[in-house]
């Protein structure tokens, strides 16, 4: 009786998954070290900035009471102007105006580029929008002073605003941050899977309903990050607000008047007219530290929003 023939088994080693990470490419360790050093350098620079601010800020609060610093009016000697709240007010007013201009336009541009524009149109329109980010801020500042204020606000709209005012500074600042919001929002919208759009259209929704009710909620974390990044850039901008926003503290809520911002105050104080170690000189660092803390809080809120609404596909 013949024995049944055995089918030949798989060759030795077949079907086995090779171990990963056993061998490394020659440049992998160097690349990992460079990336790690870049991350460490970013953290070190941040702590270096804080360390550079602490000593003069300590001297400042040894000369000025904290209540005089967080005040609406300058209290003390005539040559000491320690009140910071008018600077915070000017910064927030200009930033809010900029966001009112930039968020609708930037988000609308992102929606068009992501959902409606053809590949050919998107190919030339997106670089054109991003080109605004390459214009020097000093050019924006002079454009606000010599065109937005006299021609648009006082001429076409008849608002009769002052030569330097928060409205013109906020408008042109909003134009400057449009590319940031538009580009990042467009990337977030484009990252939404096509299957979500197709499912919405299959259920009978039109393209606008799909964009507003499906795509934007799915990309909300990226859009929120784009808006907060644009806000951070608006708060930290110097030249536009220094040229077009005004150079005097103002407690008024009238956007037609000039309001000095925190960055404009820093630029004005750092021109070399204030002796090293004086109260006005040390206040520069106190305002800078407060601006750093405000930006840090905004970025922390952005991270929390992104983590809260992040969706993985």
Image (cartoon, rainbow, N blue to C red):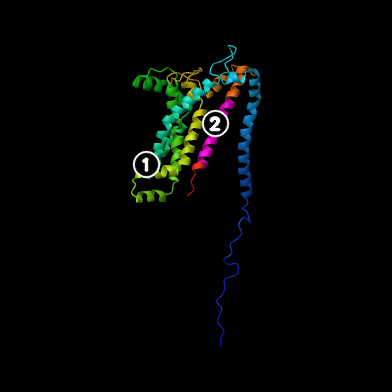
Residue lying at 49% horizontally and 29% vertically, measured from the top left? 234
Label 2 CA crowd tier, 10 Å (few <14, some 14–19, many 20+): some
Q: Over which residues does the magenta segment extend?
A: 288-307
Give the percent coordinates (x, y) of residue 270: 58, 21
Q: Nearer the viewer, residue 308 or 135?
A: 308
The numbered mark at residue 121 is 1
Label 1 CA crowd tier, 10 Å (few <14, some 14–19, many 20+): few
Residue lying at 56% horizontally and 22% vertically, measured from the top left? 266
Name the main secondary structure of what is drawn in magenta.
helix
Q: Secondary structure at mark 1?
A: helix
| Residue that protrudes farthest toward the front in the picture | 67
Residue placed under numbered mark 2 in the picture:
295
- Drawn side of residue 192 relative to residue 38, left or right: left
Give the percent coordinates (x, y) of residue 214: 40, 45
Q: First in sequence, mark 1 or 2: give its number.
A: 1
Give the percent coordinates (x, y) of residue 24: 62, 53
- Drawn side of residue 151 relative to residue 252, left or right: left
Can see residue 187?
no
Quarter containing the N terminus: bottom right
Give the CA separation, mark 1 to mark 2: 36 Å
- In reply to whether residue 282 is colored magenta, the answer given is no
Residue lying at 41% horizontally and 51% vertically, measured from the top left? 195
| Residue that protrudes farthest toward the top in the picture | 78
Q: Nearer the viewer, residue 120 or 225?
A: 225
């Amino acid at each position: 009786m013949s024995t049944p023939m055995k089918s030949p088994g798989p060759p030795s080693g077949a079907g086995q998954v090779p171990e990963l990470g056993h061998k490394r490419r020659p440049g992998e360790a160097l690349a990992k070290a460079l990336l790690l050093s870049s991350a460490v350098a970013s953290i070190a620079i941040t702590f270096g900035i804080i360390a550079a601010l602490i000593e003069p800020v300590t001297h400042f609060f040894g000369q000025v009471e904290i209540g005089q610093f967080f005040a609406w009016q300058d209290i003390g000697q005539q040559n000491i102007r320690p009140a910071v709240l008018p600077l915070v007010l000017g910064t927030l007013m200009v930033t809010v105006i900029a966001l009112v201009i930039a968020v609708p336009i930037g988000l609308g541009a992102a929606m068009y580029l992501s959902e409606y524009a053809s590949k050919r149109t998107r190919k030339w329109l997106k670089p054109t929008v991003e080109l605004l980010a390459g214009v020097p801020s000093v050019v924006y500042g002079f454009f606000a002073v010599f065109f937005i204020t006299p021609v648009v606000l006082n001429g076409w709209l008849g608002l009769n605003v002052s030569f330097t005012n928060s409205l013109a500074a906020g408008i042109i600042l909003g134009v400057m941050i449009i590319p940031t919001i538009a580009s990042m929002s467009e990337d977030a919208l484009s990252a939404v899977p096509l299957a979500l759009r197709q499912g919405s259209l299959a259920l009978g929704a039109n393209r606008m309903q799909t964009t507003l009710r499906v795509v934007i909620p799915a990309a909300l974390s990226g859009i929120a990050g784009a808006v907060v990044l644009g806000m951070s850039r608006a708060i930290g901008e110097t030249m536009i607000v220094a040229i077009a926003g005004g150079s005097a503290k103002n407690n008024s809520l009238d956007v037609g008047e000039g309001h000095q911002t925190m960055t404009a105050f820093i630029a004005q104080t750092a021109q070399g007219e204030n002796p090293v170690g004086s109260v006005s000189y040390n206040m520069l660092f106190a305002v800078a530290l407060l601006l750093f803390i405000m930006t840090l809080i905004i970025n922390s809120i952005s991270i929390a929003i992104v983590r809260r609404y992040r969706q993985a596909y």
